Image (cartoon, rainbow, N blue to C red):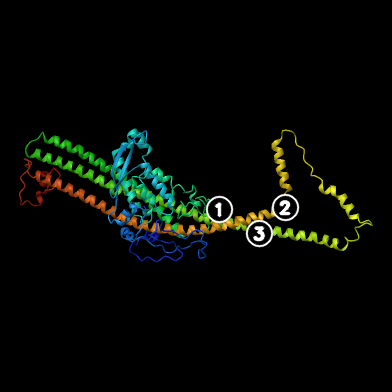
Amino acid sequence: MATFEDDANPFRTDIDGEINEPAPSSIVVDHDEHQPFREPSPTTPTQDLPPLPAKAASFPRAPPNHAAHFKERTEFCCSKDRYLHLEDDAEILIVDAQKTAEGSSSPYIVYLIRTGTTLARRRYSEFESLRNTMVKLYPTFIVPPIPSKQSLTDYAVKQSKAKEDATMIARRKRMLQTFLNRIAHHPVLSTDHTFHRFLDGDVSWSEVLHSPPVSTIPKDILRAPPHHPGEEDPPAGYQALPHPSPAQTLRNPDQRFLDSEAFTNKFASHLSGPLEKVTRRTMKRWSEYGHDHTELGGVLNGFSLSESGALAATIEKTGQAVDSTYLSTTQLLQEFEQRWAEPLHEYSQFGSIIRKLLAFRHQKHVQYEMTVDALESKKEVLDEFERSEAEARRLQEALTRPSRLNGSVFGGAAGADEDGTGDAGAAAQRQPELVAPPRRRATAGGSGLLGALSYSLQTMMDVDPETARRNNISKTRESIGQLEDALQLSMQDLKYCSQTIQADLDRFQRQKVADLREMAIAMARMHRDWCKQNLEAWEEVKKEVANVEPHPNLPPVSEEAGPSTAPSMGRAGSSGLPH
């Protein structure tokens, strides 16, 4: 199994390390506004933007204590925003899960969310819709995952009772609560009013989805400003941006994000591969171990009824110790699932989320390069049209120059008759030839399609080449103007994406280090408590075994027995417990 190297980690992990100030042209962070992390308007010309952001400016990191940081804010959009950012112990709790059929023909589970003193009822599909909405509103931030849906196997095995499985519902409660609190502790996502309305029980979620900014999010998120995809009137230049394929390669990739992608793939492969498999296998064996002790404890307790005296008490005490081992193992298994398995699965989901985030930035980078190529191509076409126009003008001037000379020098006398009608008669003779109508191709009756096609071709042939050439030049210049605006927008979007994604990756890295540390401590603590509980139970059994008379066929063990009596002691202690 490959191991992680600190040098290969492209993310910052120094929580208390030195934080550089952002460059003046970098993204603006204002926590007094509803939407932080805003750049200037995309239509604002910025001359200092590089053609390709080889190295993003230092980005302000969120401090470890988000609550203390947000106390600097003095204005809030709603009461939920105020509670989340002013209360030191602000926490969102899912206090219950209830079965209901309100507004539906079939029953479903709703989860009661408590935020401060208010309650909201949301079903799982609404949690899923909230996350999808946050992903669209914040395409450059890591939106936490929600618990996975039930698999087809679970539905096939449990059929109609799959939604009523108490274990599955309890697991969803815990993981959905983690999802809400991760958003609430995010320095940017926590300020979103759509999230606040989700926590408000008096607001219908359907109403939220059909109102701005959610209702104004375009279908193609790549043709929307990443800092505000729900903007109602975005710049027109976004419509000129191409839609790149995720598989398209870059000519000038950013090495930082290539390293981030490689590290993320490595991290995700460790979690979703051997680590999760071993975790599932460990939980299965602990579960089997607990069930075996349940059966063994019952057998021993029944066996104690057939004996009497100290032996019966010893067997009964042993059965009780086995029962205690079952209880401690069950508790260990629950803590192992909550504090290790579920966070592990969550971080395996984070791996795929980060990959999609990097893929979005990759597409924005490809979009920028495609816009540059399209602009260069249009400029080449315009140059070709302008050369053709210049050549046509030179040819026209060359053809008209001799006629002007002939008309000025010889036209006054040479072409006139005595009565002054010579030129007029010649013009009259040439008149029918000039105005003669073009010959039309005969068409057979009933051939409407062929006739229309022939008419279209004849119309194209009758177009004045000079007019068509000038129209093409005008349209090409208009396209170039649109592409220049689109290129400016794409350049700013790429810079914004690079800065915000790198900053959120650094924040996620710090969060991951802290969470994995807590997971390791929890793992050690749960095993320590399990061993402590079992040791106390089996110490009681040891005291009870001491009251049982020794084997009659063995000599009594003297206190001064030396090493030679060790085998006898081993036989006397046939119960397997040390004296």
The answer to whether residue 23 is above or below residue 243 is below
Residue 212 placement, left or right of 80: right
Please, what secondary structure does the residue beneath circle 3 have?
helix
Residue 296 appears in the rendering: yes
Residue 177 placement, left or right of 223: left
Give the residue at mark 1: 240
Q: Amino acid at mark 2?
A: Pro
Please, what secondary structure does the residue beneath circle 2 have?
helix
Give the residue at mark 3: 383
- For marks 3 and 1, the one nearer the N-term is 1
Marks 2 and 3, how far apart at CA:
17 Å
Q: Residues within 10 Å of mark 3 (few under 14, many from 20)?
A: some
Residue 382: which quarter of the image? bottom right
Give the residue at mark 2: 465
Please state which of the two labelled residues, at mark 3 or mark 1, is closer to the viewer. 1
Q: Residue at x 93, y 56 (%)?
A: 417
The answer to the question of whether label 2 and label 3 lie on touching residues, with beta carbons closer than 8 A, is: no
Residue 142 in the image: state x and y as whole percent: 40, 53
- For marks 1 and 2, the one nearer the N-term is 1
Marks 1 and 2, how far apart at CA:
28 Å
Q: Amino acid at mark 3?
A: Asp
